[in-house]
Image (cartoon, grey):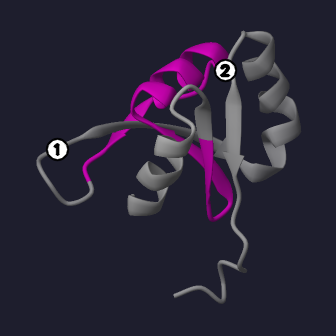
Amino acid sequence: MRQYHKVKQQHPDAILLFRVGDFYETFGEDAVKTANILGITLTKRANGSAYEEELSGFPHHALETYLPKLIQAGQRVAVCDQLEDPKQAK
């Protein structure tokens, strides 16, 4: 989550699509907006603590389907992709 928050600080006015494995995930207020616009499930993530944060996401191969919908809804979007192979990452 540190990486997510660091990137989000650089793009506070955009929905941040953050690549986690095979999914683009959104958190907090971005997750609520994304779920509403795209009609996808909104869930929560606890990260092992009492604090919960909203979460929504979609498979990375569906980016070409979902990105235009977010933009057409008037949202700015930042895409944060993985630069290393997730199978090789530790």
Neighbourhood count class around disc 2 (C-alpha, 10 Å): few under 14, some 14–19, many 20 upward: some
Residue at x 59% of width, y 26% of height: 40
- The Cα atoms of the two marked residues, 2 and 1, are separated by 25 Å
The answer to which of 47 and 82 lies nearer the viewer is 82
**Residue 20 location, quadrant:** bottom right
Q: Is residue 1 left or right of 17 when viewed as pictured? A: left
**Residue 38, disc:** 2
Q: Quadrant of residue 85?
A: bottom right
Give the amino acid at mark 2. Answer: Leu
In the rendered image, which quarter is residue 13 located in?
Answer: top right
Q: Secondary structure at mark 1?
A: loop
83 left or right, relative to 26: right
Q: Residue at x 73, y 72 (%)?
A: 83
Which is closer to the viewer, label 2 or label 1? 1
**Residue 86, relative to residue 73: is it above or below?**
below
- Counting from the top left corner in percent of width and height, residue 67 is at 79, 30
Mark 1, residue position: 51
Tell me if residue 8 is in the magenta stretch: no
Residue at 31%, 39% (x, y): give it.
Answer: 53
